[in-house]
Amino acid sequence: MTHSLFLLPGDGIGTEIMVEVEKVIAWTNAEQLTDFVTDSGLAGGSAYDKHQVAITDEDTAKALAADAVIFGAVGGPKWDNVPYEHRPEAALLRLRKEMAVFANLRPAICYPALADASSLKRELVEGLDILIVRELTGGVYFGEPKTITDLGDGQKRAIDTQVYETYEIDRIARVAFDLARTRNNRVHSADKKNVMKSGVLWDEVVKGVGKDYPDVKLEHILADNAAMQLVRNPKQFDVMVTDNLFGDILSDVAAMLTGSLGMLPSASLGAPDAVTGKRKAFYEPVHGSAPDIAGQGIANPIAMIASFAMALRYSFNMIELADKIEGAIAAVLDDGLRTGDIAQDNRKRVGTEEMGAAILAKLKA
Ligand code: IPM
Ligand code: MG
């Protein structure tokens, strides 16, 4: 049975790292481990340059129709002055919203070989395996009104709206609890209920859902304390569920614990289809388009390749193949190969292509 992948490399290093994933896909197809049909489109600045929008209706429709979207990264200083609604990030936000991929899974795993690349001490991060479950289609990212109003007299007023409804909190909480059951049965729910009404409701709904999961230990944590605890003692966490904005921030903190943003994949999943049970799904590295190093062939392709592994795991139930790819990544790191972002003095410094080729060689072995 064929499955469709829609590839959106985006801008900057996005295009360079996508090339390495395409090689992995070509190999899994050639080995008849998969039967992927791929198509690709433009997102972000590259779409703007060609079509004057961050993503076209046509590419959005293709993303909606695909079994999974594999996304690189968007943005760069070149597009700093494009109209706000067409800025590169608008492509990402449009896809998240239209695909309704409300559950963003951001695992932060510290590969043993990289424990020294973290800015925290080895003993704090070695063996780290936490999962941030970020709500992705609601909250202050999308709430209305979202405006800047001119008040005259040189003053303006800017408004963003933080808004959550019960069903949005309920469904993301269930994703977190379900995932906790496949891990260590612990969920921390992070909000700011001490200041925000949306936090009060968040906590109330999560606690209600928690009653359906008596086997999972639920703990409440204020989002600011969560940030502090993540750098103080990150291994105390298993699954952390939080809203869109806190999840954006806390997942960057969690990412850095692992040594480099260049290591972290993510999956964004929608609700299961009532008939087919299939979820819309969007896979992307947590890092951005890194315009400062784009075009030099030195970007780390690991997060991108690991995002493809997440697609195999969550969209296609190809657990063994996903494990194999993650194993290949761990193996090249054990061999001492390092891109610039995770470089250590005594290790072999490689570029994007060489890292991709080494991972592929491990897969073939
Ligand atoms: C992320 C990014 C995006 C976000 C930006 C690029 C819009 O930071 O995926 O974490 O804020 O969600
Ligand atoms: Mg972010």
Image (tube, grey):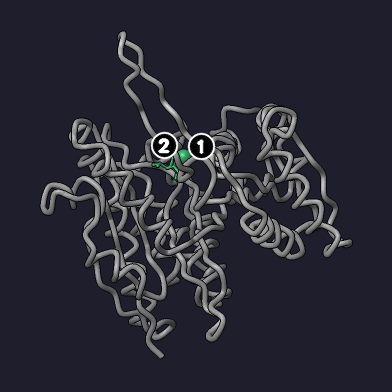
Residue that numbered label 1 is attached to: 161
Which quadrant is the C terminus positioned in?
Answer: bottom left
251 lies left or right of 131:
left
Label 1: which secondary element: strand
Tell me the kind of residue under disc 2. Lys
SS for callout 2: strand
User: 323 left or right of 65?
Assistant: right
Q: Residue at x 27, y 59 (%)?
A: 19
In the depicted structure, whether residue 140 falls above or below residue 3 = above
Q: Position of residue 63 (x, y in %)?
A: 33, 67
Residue 1, located in which quarter of the rendered image? Answer: bottom left
Residue in the foreground of this view, choosing between 228 and 212: 212
The image quadrant that residue 9 belongs to is: bottom left
Residue 231 can be seen, yes or no: no
Query: Which label number is shown at residue 146?
Result: 2
Task: Name which of mark 1 and mark 2 comes first in the sequence.
Answer: 2
